[in-house]
């Protein structure tokens, strides 16, 4: 079902991110802005889909900083607004975020941030709760999808009550589990009406900021004294208690049941600041020892230690001495720690070794992906020019260029970092040629400032923009270069080549990566140009995402004609497998063959085959 469907009281099965989106709808959200990023993406997509049905505004922004500023602007007009992002997206938005901590807000402003313990699809495991502490912005953590829905509704109310933004922290497991959710009434969008001019709050001059800093501390302390919604005490026997938050509370519930333990438990949804009255009461229920179960950093543990010192609690507080600070928790890990605390025997579940030889399946670019063709071009052009190359990469599908057969990603830190790092390498390693890669969406998101720097400071770097005309990795979302929005409506198209020329790049070329020979020639020219002119060059490898194009063809009823290998001509040279690596091509009896079920008919393999052994089905063999 769609998140905007159903009536109050219905029990429905929703993804965690869909439950979060439903909570925003029931909370009267009037404005939504975000940037896609796993594991947060589905919440943004669900809200955009609902916006046209329910009459509120929603957009995919250029990056997370812009998204937060769009949401803040709506809040300053009295509207209820939500910004969505993954955890590393908050780094991008941090400048604005930190100032919101001082200024506060007008209409309710909720920031959905989805953390990624275990770094399933991210470059780090950073804990968003620390950002809340840093900025004096409350952090709410649901433990299951239905509570996530309710917490988002409450976050809008809390935001308006204390005139502060509020973070709702999800994690990969919470965002991507499905669970029963009890629907409430959809609320009318709170749209506000006009800008609430307040120069003493919205203009962060030093004199204002000093006063606002004190007010931010007062707000957070007040919320600590007054807030305890969706947090509760569970009494039990003994003098040792457990504190848990988020999905870790679910693991605690299962562990206690399996170990047959009845102990005091403090379940927290407000994890910064801690609800002071509940903590004080819990200290009396667990006078000997408290065990804190939380994923990643000891955020609750550190706050409890501070409150224990202030309130005179003399018991022992434990947490990260028992439980890992790295990766996800699970019921087994929690059971093992609690068994140690309570002196119980615990045998870890036996994992059976099935001894089955399963072929390895490393991450790979899709069949027909233009990025694969362009990586082949980069490798061949580097070989032709006999250069010693350095290949800074970025965040996107093309990060997979790190893997064989290409190995053309030497660095990958964050969105937009590849070119910037390449600029430094170009000055520090004069005998090497820097060829940096970046995606089209990432270029708009965070790549333009480094390109301007390359022009201004004369960096001899080749920037290859892997342009598949979509934000493909997170699910084919549009961006400023697609020419349409998430609803399929036409939008002004921003051209990467126009931006490159506008900032002063003299060598700008567009290639079709399927046209391998021309692309190698153009990239070779770019390498020569940067060497001779001590300035940057931009090569845009433009090819619509093959997976998206394949689906569009099927929808239009177009036939996709695969290629095949003429066994009589094939010599088994393995260029198509070992140097190009398309997953639709394999080897049998020292001959290449094409798996027609997954071949999309791009024809690049036919172009690179040195013996002309690959043909299009239906053509002359």
Image: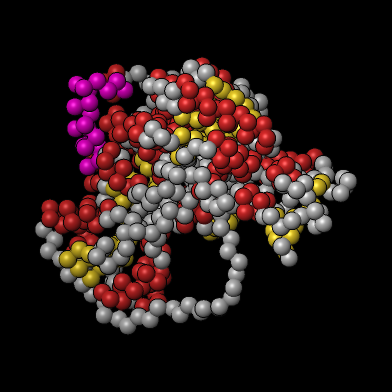
Residues rendered magenta in the picture: 202-221
Name the foreground residue: 363 vs 513.
Answer: 513
Q: How many marks?
A: 0
327 with respect to 607 (left or right): left
Q: Is residue 36 above or below residue 361?
A: above
Q: Quadrant of residue 96?
A: top left
| Residue at x-position 43% and y-position 43% | 411
Please give left or right for residue 210 compared with residue 417 in the image.
left
Residue at the spot 22% in from the left edge and 52% down from the top edge: 303
Kindly indicate the quadrant of the structure image that contains residue 260.
bottom left
Q: Is residue 128 above or below residue 596?
A: above
Residue sitting at 42 percent across and 48 percent down? 123
Which colour style is shown? secondary structure
The answer to whether residue 196 of the structure is visible from this angle is yes
Residue 115 position within the rendered picture, expressed as x and y whole percent measured from the top left: 41, 49
Q: With respect to residue 202, does 440 lie above or below?
A: below
In the rendered structure, does residue 593 fall within the stretch colored magenta?
no
Residue at 82%, 41% in the rendered image: 558
Q: Position of residue 305 (x, y in %)?
A: 18, 56
Using the rendered image of the protein, determine whether residue 24 is visible from the camera's viewpoint. Answer: no
Nearer to the camera, 216 or 389: 389
Q: Position of residue 182 (x, y in %)?
A: 53, 54
607 displayed left or right of 204: right
Is 210 included in the stretch rendered in magenta? yes
Q: Position of residue 351 (x, y in %)?
A: 48, 77
Q: Main secondary structure of the magenta part?
A: helix
The answer to whether 38 is drawn above or below residue 341 in the figure is: above
Q: Nearer the viewer, residue 353 or 506?
A: 506
| Relative to 159, 307 lies left or right | left
């Amino acid at each position: 079902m769609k998140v905007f469907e159903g009536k109050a009281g219905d029990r429905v099965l929703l993804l965690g991110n869909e439950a979060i989106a439903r909570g925003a709808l029931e909370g009267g959200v009037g404005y939504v802005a975000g940037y896609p990023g796993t594991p947060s993406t589905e919440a943004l997509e669900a809200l955009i889909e609902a916006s046209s049905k329910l009459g509120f505004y929603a957009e995919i922004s250029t990056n997370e900083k812009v998204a937060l500023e769009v949401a803040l602007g709506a809040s300053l007009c009295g509207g209820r607004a939500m910004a969505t992002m993954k955890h590393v997206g908050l780094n991008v938005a941090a400048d604005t975020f930190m100032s919101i901590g001082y200024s506060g807000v007008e209409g309710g402003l909720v920031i959905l941030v989805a953390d990624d313990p275990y770094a399933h699809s991210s470059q780090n495991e950073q804990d968003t709760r620390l950002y809340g502490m840093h900025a004096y912005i409350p952090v709410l953590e649901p433990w299951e999808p239905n509570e996530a829905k309710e917490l988002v509704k409450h976050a809008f109310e809390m935001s308006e009550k204390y005139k502060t933004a509020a973070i709702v922290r999800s994690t990969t497991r919470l965002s991507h589990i499905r669970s029963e959710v009890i629907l409430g009434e959809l609320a009318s969008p709170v749209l506000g009406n006009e800008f609430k001019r307040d120069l003493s709050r919205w203009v962060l001059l030093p004199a204002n900021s000093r006063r606002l800093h004190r007010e931010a501390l007062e707000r957070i302390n007040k919320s600590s004294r007054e807030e305890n919604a969706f947090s509760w005490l569970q009494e039990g026997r003994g003098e040792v208690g457990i504190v848990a938050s988020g999905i870790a509370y679910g693991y605690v519930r299962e562990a206690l049941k399996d170990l047959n333990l009845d102990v005091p438990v403090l379940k927290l949804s407000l994890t910064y600041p801690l609800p002071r009255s509940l903590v004080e009461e819990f200290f009396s229920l667990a006078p000997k020892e408290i065990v804190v179960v939380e994923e990643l950093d000891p955020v609750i543990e550190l706050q409890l230690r501070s409150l224990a010192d202030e309130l005179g609690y003399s018991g022992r507080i434990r947490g990260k001495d028992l439980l890992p600070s790295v990766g996800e928790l699970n019921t087994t890990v929690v059971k093992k720690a609690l068994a140690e605390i309570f002196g119980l025997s615990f045998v870890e579940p036996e994992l059976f070794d099935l001894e089955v030889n399963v072929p390895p399946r490393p991450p790979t670019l899709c069949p027909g992906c233009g990025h694969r063709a362009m990586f082949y071009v980069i490798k061949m052009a580097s070989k032709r020019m006999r250069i010693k190359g350095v290949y800074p990469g970025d965040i996107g599908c093309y990060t997979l260029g790190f893997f064989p057969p290409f190995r053309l990603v030497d660095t990958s830190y964050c969105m937009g970092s590849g070119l910037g790092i390449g600029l430094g390498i170009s000055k520090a390693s004069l005998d090497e040629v820097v060829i940096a890669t970046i995606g089209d969406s990432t270029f708009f998101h965070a790549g333009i400032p480094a390109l301007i720097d390359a022009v201004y400071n004369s960096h001899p770097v080749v920037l290859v923009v892997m342009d598949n005309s979509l934000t493909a990795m997170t699910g084919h979302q549009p961006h400023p270069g697609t020419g349409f929005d998430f609803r399929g409506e036409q939008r002004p198209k921003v051209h990467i080549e126009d931006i490159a020329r506008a900032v002063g790049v003299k060598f700008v070329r567009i290639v079709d990566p399927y046209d391998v020979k021309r692309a190698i020639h153009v990239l070779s020219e770019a390498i020569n140009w940067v060497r001779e002119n001590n300035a940057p060059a931009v090569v845009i490898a433009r090819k619509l995402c093959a997976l998206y194009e394949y689906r569009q063809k099927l929808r239009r009823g177009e036939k996709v004609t695969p290629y095949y290998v003429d066994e009589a001509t094939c010599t088994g040279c393995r260029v198509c497998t070992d140097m190009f690596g398309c997953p639709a091509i394999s080897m049998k009896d020292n001959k290449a063959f094409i798996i027609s079920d997954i071949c999309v008919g791009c024809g690049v393999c036919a172009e690179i085959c040195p013996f002309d052994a690959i043909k299009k089905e239906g053509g002359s063999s």
